[in-house]
Amino acid sequence: MIIPPPQCDSLLFSAGGYHPAQDLVLIMDVARFKYPPHWVPLRLLYESMAPLDPASGKSRGYLVVSSTEAMIASCCGE
């Protein structure tokens, strides 16, 4: 889950995929009729999360959502 910059209407975007050869992330919005899926450079996505939010004074960010099994496998090498 990606928290978009303040100028966006959405609360959250989903990262629907990653293209390693081109270093692109597929961005998907729940309001796909208004914001169709599109590919963005990973660097641009990362940089878009850096500006501070005027309301909170904190930068935007992302949230990784996974199953317990996937989390254990990724951190414990299983």
Image (spheres, rainbow, N blue to C red):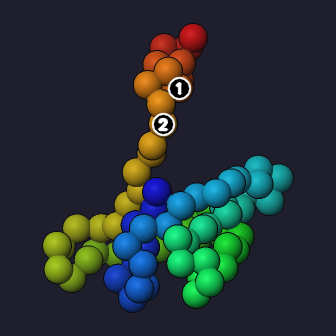
Taking the spot 55% from the left edge, 72% from the top edge, the residue there is 29
Tally of marks: 2
Q: Residue at x 52, y 71 (%)?
A: 30
Local SS, label 2: loop
Q: Residues within 10 Å of mark 2 (few under 14, many from 20)?
A: few
Q: Position of residue 4 (x, y in %)?
A: 43, 73
Above or below, 66 relative to 71: below
Residue for point 68% across, 54% down: 17
Q: Is residue 41 visible?
A: no
Residue 67 in the image: above or below residue 49: above
Which residue appears farthest toward the top when viewing the image? 78
- Residue 40 seen by the camera: yes
Q: Residues within 10 Å of mark 1 (few under 14, many from 20)?
A: few
Residue 76, position in %: x, y? Answer: 48, 14
The residue drawn where x is 28% and y is 75% is 52
Cα distance in 3D space between marks 1 and 2: 6 Å
Residue, disc 2? 66
Type of amino acid at the residue the image marks with label 2: Ser
Say what secondary structure mark 1 lies in: helix
Amino acid beneath label 1? Ala
Q: Quadrant of residue 8?
A: bottom left
Do labels 1 and 2 touch, CB within 8 Å? Answer: yes
Q: Position of residue 20 (x, y in %)?
A: 76, 50
Residue 62 - label: none
Residue 60 shown left or right of residue 77 in the figure: left
Quarter of the C terminus within the rendering: top right
Pick out the residue farthest to the left: 56
Q: Position of residue 61 (x, y in %)?
A: 38, 61
For this rendering, which residue is in front, 29 or 47?
Answer: 29
- Left or right: residue 51 versus residue 78 is left
Task: Name the residue beneath numbered marker 1.
Answer: 70
